[in-house]
Amino acid sequence: MGMRGPGKSAAAKTPVDSIIVSIPVELRVKKWFTDIETVKKMYTAASRSLSIQNEEEILVGFFQSDLEFGNIIENSERIKVRERALGPDLITITDGNFQSLSNDDIIKGTVVVTNTNENLEWVEGVDYEIEYSTGKIRHLFTSGSPGTAKGAGAGSGSSINTASFELTVQKSVTVHYQYYSTKTKDFDYSINYVRGSLSRKEGGTLVSGTKVNIDYRVQELIQDEVIALSIDQAHVWILDRIGDELETSSDDRLKYGEAYFSLFLISKMSAANLIYEKRNDDVEEAAKELSLISEDYRRLALSFLQKHIKFPVGRRTGKVSKNKSWSLVTRNPFI
């Protein structure tokens, strides 16, 4: 009985109602040179879940809109719509502590802070700082001695000669901004986690043509079963060229050569899947890049294996010329 791979235990059973109580069984495990964990670590996309932030989709009608990835982790999604704060928010700053805006999840690049007359604008990082996720803002005071209740002096020894506007201990400002509002699954939208598609729900708050931003996490892009199949194919390919007698070798060159050849096969399959699914217009370019990466994996594999390769399987072609013998041409077996 032959097995190949990680070498898991196996049980041998006799037929039902057999009078044979015990039989001698020989188990021979043909070990791979590499293993699944090694390949996953070398192929970083397979070694961890993928986190997607702010993918944009326009939901039209009740049609399914395909996301960039499938195999989404259940309940990891967050469907958001950009909203503009109405008002704007009026914040009174009395010290250097954070003050809360009316909303959280503020969108970067949309914040404008001014005095109440809205004719003097504050500078982020100089006059104020903001925590975008929590929706909190605070005033940054100039270093040096504090100002009076009516004015903020530059302070003794300060290099600041003028300020953009008068600062006081108690200061009111207006804050214009946009933020994300989160939508509710099964009321506003429905999602297919396996396929990776999204659609609006009738009766929800999303109208047709709404642009949404989606955060979600993807499960491992390459499953263990696919990696195991690729390693086994790589193992057979390598043994055909180095001989069965080296199958028990612990040479690291064989280990990494087999790992890189497995990555070559995985990348080829991934490129084919991209073209098959064709989720967006950039897929062909992505597939080309993945194919180029796969060729790098193949070359690395051969660089590790070249010392042990003894039986290159070349394809031979021949052609007959009048009054001439067969002309044999041996092609590169690795192309």
Image (spheres, rainbow, N blue to C red):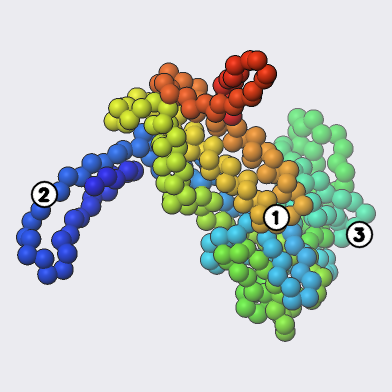
Q: CA distance from mark 1 to mark 3?
A: 52 Å
Q: CA distance from mark 2 to mark 3?
A: 94 Å
Of residues 177 and 49, the one drawn nearer to the viewer in this rendering? 49
- Residue drawn at x 35%, y 37% as measured from the top left: 32
* 1 or 3: tag closer to the N-terminus: 3
Residue 287 placed where, x, y %? 68, 44
Residue lying at the far bottom of the rendered structure: 203
Q: Amino acid at mark 3?
A: Asn
Residue 218 placed where, x, y %? 56, 56
* Dot label at residue 136: none
Q: Residue 267, can we see it?
A: yes
Q: Secondary structure at mark 2?
A: loop
Q: Secondary structure at mark 1?
A: loop
* 2 or 3: tag closer to the N-terminus: 2
Q: Amino acid at mark 1?
A: Lys
Q: CA distance from mark 2 to mark 1?
A: 54 Å
In front: label 2 or label 3: 2
Q: Which residue is mark 3?
A: 117
Within 10 Å of disc 2 (Cα), the crowding (few <14, some 14-19, many 20+) is: few
Q: Which residue is mark 1?
A: 278
Of residues 194 and 262, the one drawn nearer to the viewer in this rendering? 262
Horizontal side of residue 317 vs 158, given as left or right: left
Q: Which residue is mark 2?
A: 24
- Residue drawn at x 80%, y 41% as measured from the top left: 153
Residue lying at the far front of the rendered structure: 323
Q: Amino acid at mark 2?
A: Pro
Residue lying at the far top of the rendered structure: 324
* 2 or 1: tag closer to the N-terminus: 2
